[in-house]
Image: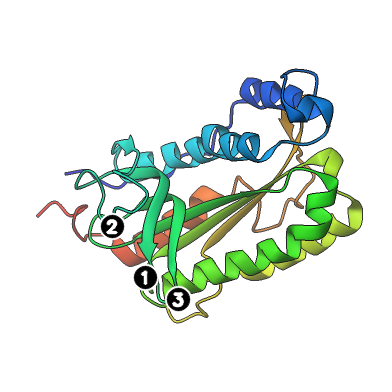
């Protein structure tokens, strides 16, 4: 039986980010993105999120939960995990209070305890057109989880390339995400999330921008592990599968 541990820092590999940066910049690859630089195509965006971002967060969740396995769901429609105690990464089906929803990462040993989704906006036009729709999606996903699983911890990460983000968008997105990342207790509003991280990365160097969001922001990736650990311990400490009775 796995014992709870402190959630480790989220480690995103800079070399891997740099490789994806060359694809985003159009300096490598033979597909559409090389003809239209400074963007990912749809498949690249999905692969980037899963292979780089989601995997880093899944590994940290698994360590917090006692070093349990990270595995893929049986299929995108399965309502049960493939093993009794594992972190699932991939399209994981959750039947929420509003609608069925597939999350990128889930922990559901006895029903949903952790639900995580990553959102990647990858070029200037898509950010301008879609960031407010993305916010609506985050609130709806949090609501559909919390109305059926009020004790579940809902987490999001929003990832944007630095060259595609202008100052006004940075301000608006940051402030809006900070308002959403405010659910501390099960009595709080359902549309809020327990933890949100806002990652701005530089494709040319593979570096995460250290100035966005501000050092005191709840959206900093450095704060994510402590927030999630605190919420999880408050709600599940001493309960199966973590108790030692």
Report the Cα–Cα distance between label 2 and label 1.
18 Å
Residue pictured at 38% horizontal, 74% vertical: 150
- Residue denoted by label 2: 79
Where is residue 213 shown, x and y percent of the image? 75, 51
Identify the mark nearer the N-term, 2 or 1: 2
Locate residue 152 relative to residue 225 in the image: left or right.
left
Identify the mark nearer the N-term, 3 or 1: 3
Disc 1 packing (10 Å; few <14; some 14–19; many ≥20):
many
Front disc: 3 or 1:
3
The quadrant holding residue 89 is top left
3 in relation to 228, above or below: above
- Which numbered tag is attached to residue 126? none
Q: Nearer the viewer, residue 235 or 201?
A: 201
Residue at the outermost right position: 167
Locate residue 199 relative to residue 89 in the image: left or right.
right
Q: Nearer the viewer, residue 153 or 43?
A: 43
Identify the mark nearer the N-term, 2 or 3: 2
Report the Cα–Cα distance between label 3 and label 1.
16 Å
- Residue denoted by label 3: 98
Residue 117 visible: yes
Where is residue 90 shown, x and y percent of the image? 43, 43
């Amino acid at each position: 039986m796995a014992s709870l541990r402190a959630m480790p820092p989220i480690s995103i590999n800079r070399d891997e980010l740099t490789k994806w940066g060359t694809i985003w910049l159009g300096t490598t690859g033979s597909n559409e993105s090389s003809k239209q630089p400074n963007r990912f195509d749809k498949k690249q965006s999905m692969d980037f999120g899963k292979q780089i971002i989601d995997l880093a967060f899944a590994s940290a969740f698994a360590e917090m939960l006692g070093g349990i396995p990270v595995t893929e769901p049986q299929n995108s429609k399965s309502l049960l995990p493939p093993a009794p105690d594992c972190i699932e990464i991939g399209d994981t089906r959750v039947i929420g209070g509003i609608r069925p929803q597939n999350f990128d990462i889930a922990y559901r040993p006895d029903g949903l305890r952790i639900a995580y989704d990553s959102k990647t906006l990858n070029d200037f036009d898509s950010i301008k057109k879609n960031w407010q729709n993305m916010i609506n999606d985050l609130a709806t996903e949090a609501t559909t989880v919390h109305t059926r699983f009020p004790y579940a911890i809902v987490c999001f990460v929003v990832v944007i390339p630095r060259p595609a983000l202008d100052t006004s968008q940075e301000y608006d997105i940051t402030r809006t995400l900070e308002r959403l990342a405010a659910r501390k207790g099960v009595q709080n509003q359902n549309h809020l999330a327990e933890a949100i991280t806002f990652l701005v990365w530089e494709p040319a160097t593979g570096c995460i921008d250290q100035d966005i969001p501000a050092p005191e922001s709840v959206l900093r990736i450095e704060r994510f592990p402590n927030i999630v650990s605190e919420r999880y311990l408050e709600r599940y400490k001493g309960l199966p599968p973590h108790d030692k009775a």
